Image: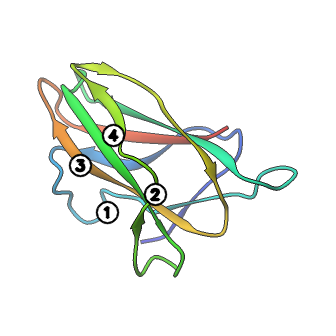
Amino acid sequence: MATLLLETGGSPQSVVNAATSTTLPAGAVVPFAISPARGGGPTTVTFEAVGASAVPTTVTAQLQVSEDGGTTFQNYGSALNLVAASVGTVAAVANMISGVIYKLTLTTLTIGSAVSVTVYAAVS
């Protein structure tokens, strides 16, 4: 699967597509990279979970990073709480760098009344 490039100030892009459980089919998780920040240095990426037809009950995710072109991934920071008690929040992760590949793995998903969940990422 190709790596999605997130650009500073660009539109939010889907990095987890139509998840219905934490066991995701091939293609549901989209590896992504970050374009170099203007002026260099690290950037902040925001993540938001959006339910189809309703807000899910719980969504937590783990950001992972690969420094070998996507062969192996390690956890990057703490788990992200994207939805708790059917209330969505935008999670911001600071100090992300270009030149590596990231992916988001869902660790908890309670779908509730939602049909599925898509997670969007944007670089600020």
Distance from Cα at disc 4 to Cα at disc 1? 13 Å
4 or 1: tag closer to the N-terminus: 1
For the C terminus, the image quarter is: top right
Q: Position of residue 66 (x, y in %)?
A: 48, 72
> Mark 3 — residue?
107
Q: Position of residue 58 (x, y in %)?
A: 21, 30
Label 3 vs 2, first from the N-terminus: 2
Rounded to the nearest angstrom, the CA distance separating label 2 from label 4 is 20 Å
Q: Kindly state the secondary structure of the residue where label 4 is placed.
A: strand
Picture residue at 34% right of the left edge, 30% below the top? 50
Residue located beneath label 2 in the image: 76
Query: From the viewer's perspective, is the residue at label 3 or at label 2 nearer?
Result: 2
Count numbered badges in the picture.
4
Mark 4 lies on residue: 118
**In front of the other: label 4 or label 3?**
3
Three-letter amino acid code at the position of disc 2: Tyr
Front-lying residue, 117 or 45: 45
The residue beneath circle 1 is 27
Q: Secondary structure at mark 1?
A: loop
